Amino acid sequence: MGYETEKGLAPSRRFPLLVWGPAESPCHGARTLYVRSGDGGLVKRNCFSCNQPWSVSKYEFLKLDINIGCPRCAKPMTRTILPYQENHGFECSACEFRERFADVLPHYSELVR
Ligand SMILES: [Zn+2]
Ligand SMILES: [Zn+2]
C-alpha cells in the first residue's frame, strides 16, 4: 500500500478535511479521526492513539455536522448515502454534483506517527 495521491479531491480543495469523531475510541479512550480506508470509498474512524480503525455507520455519518461547499458551484452540499456502493458522500442540491466522503479525508496511513 503506497501513499495515495489526492486524485479524488476537487481542485479547489488543497487539504484533506480533519473531522473528529463524536465518540472516543473504545481501545484507548482517545480522540478519533475520520480517514479514508481504501480505494473503494470506505470510511473508518481511527483511534488517534494507536490508529485502530472502527467502522462508521450510515446513521453516525448522517448525524455529523460537516459543512462543505460544492467544488463546482460553491453551494452548500448535503450529507447523503451515495447510490453506488452505498458510500458515505455529499450531494449538491443545486448542480447535483456528488462526491465521496472518503475522497475529502486523509488516508489512514497519514496518521502514523
Ligand atoms: Zn487505540
Ligand atoms: Zn454544485
Image (cartoon, helix red, strand yellow):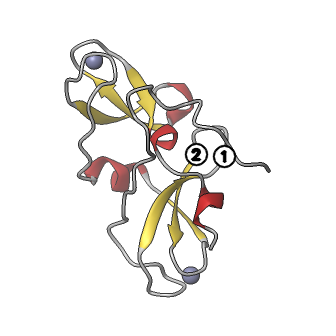
Spot occupied by residue 21 in the image (x, y as percentages of width and height): 37, 65
Horizontal relation, residue 93 to residue 56: left or right? left
Q: 44 or 67, which lies in front?
A: 67
Spot occupied by residue 7 in the image (x, y as percentages of width and height): 59, 30
Residue appearing at x 50%, y 34% in the figure: 86
Seen in the picture, residue 43 relative to 53 is either above or below; the reply is: above
Residue at far right of view: 1
Disc ID at residue 111: none
Q: Is mark 2 within 8 Å of ligand 1?
A: no
Residue appearing at x 32%, y 15% in the figure: 96
Residue appearing at x 40%, y 78% in the figure: 24
Spot occupied by residue 82 in the image (x, y as percentages of width and height): 44, 29
Residue at numbered disc 2: 42
Residue at numbered disc 1: 38
Q: Say which element carries label 2.
A: loop
Residue at far top of view: 95
* CA gap, disc 1 and disc 2: 6 Å
Tally of marks: 2
Crowding at mark 2 (Cα within 10 Å: few <14, some 14-19, many 20+):
some
Find out whether the residues at labels 1 and 2 contact each other: C-beta distance under 8 Å. yes
